[in-house]
Image (cartoon, grey):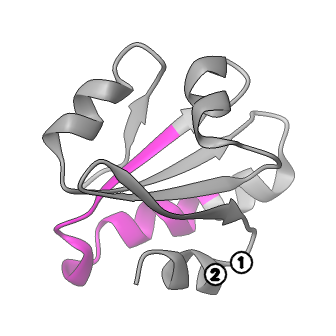
Amino acid sequence: MPVIHSNDADFRAILTSQDKIVVKFYADWCGSCKILAPKFEAMSNEADKADITFVKINAEENPEIRKAVGVSNLPFFVYFENKAIKASGSMSKEDAIRALIQ
């Protein structure tokens, strides 16, 4: 499934309608964010991750959700399961992201 681009206004609807969500917080100026973008997109299309909704949110343009989940550095990932945060952290390696959602 393609990555969904979300924001402060519509994220709550995504959170309440999906069981498993991984969110990537990024900024347009962030080099690591740009490097991870195609890998994150590819992960969203893997068959074994079909039950996970992949979302990206521009951290600079969406301060409410950024503050709510405690974004401290970019790129920052948050894994939600049944509307609760199960894991989060700033990471720039694909293996770390995969471990986050396992």
Tell me the tag on residue 93. Answer: 1
Q: Give the extent of the magenta segment.
A: 37-56
Tell me the tag on residue 21. Answer: none
Q: Position of residue 87 (x, y in %)?
A: 53, 67
The one nearer the camera, 90 or 94, is 90
State the residue at coordinates (26%, 34%): 14
Disc 1 vs disc 2: Cβ atoms closer than 8 Å?
yes
Image position of 11 with respect to 16: above or below? above
State the residue at coordinates (43%, 75%): 101
Quarter in which the C terminus is drawn: bottom left
Q: Say few, some or many: other residues with alpha carbon within 10 Å of mark 1 (under 14 / 14 to 19 / 20 or more).
A: few
State the residue at coordinates (72%, 52%): 34
Left or right side of 97 for 7: left
Q: Which residue is mark 2?
A: 96
Q: Is residue 51 magenta?
A: yes
Q: Is residue 29 magenta?
A: no
User: Which element carries disc 1, helix, strand or loop?
Assistant: loop
Q: Position of residue 51 (x, y in %)?
A: 17, 67
Image position of 37 with respect to 64: above or below? below
The one nearer the camera, 102 or 40, is 102
Left or right side of 27 for 51: left
In which quarter of the view is residue 4 placed? top left
Image position of 88 with respect to 57: above or below? below
Q: Amino acid at mark 1?
A: Lys
State the residue at coordinates (42%, 33%): 5
Q: Say few, some or many: other residues with alpha carbon within 10 Å of mark 2 (under 14 / 14 to 19 / 20 or more).
A: few
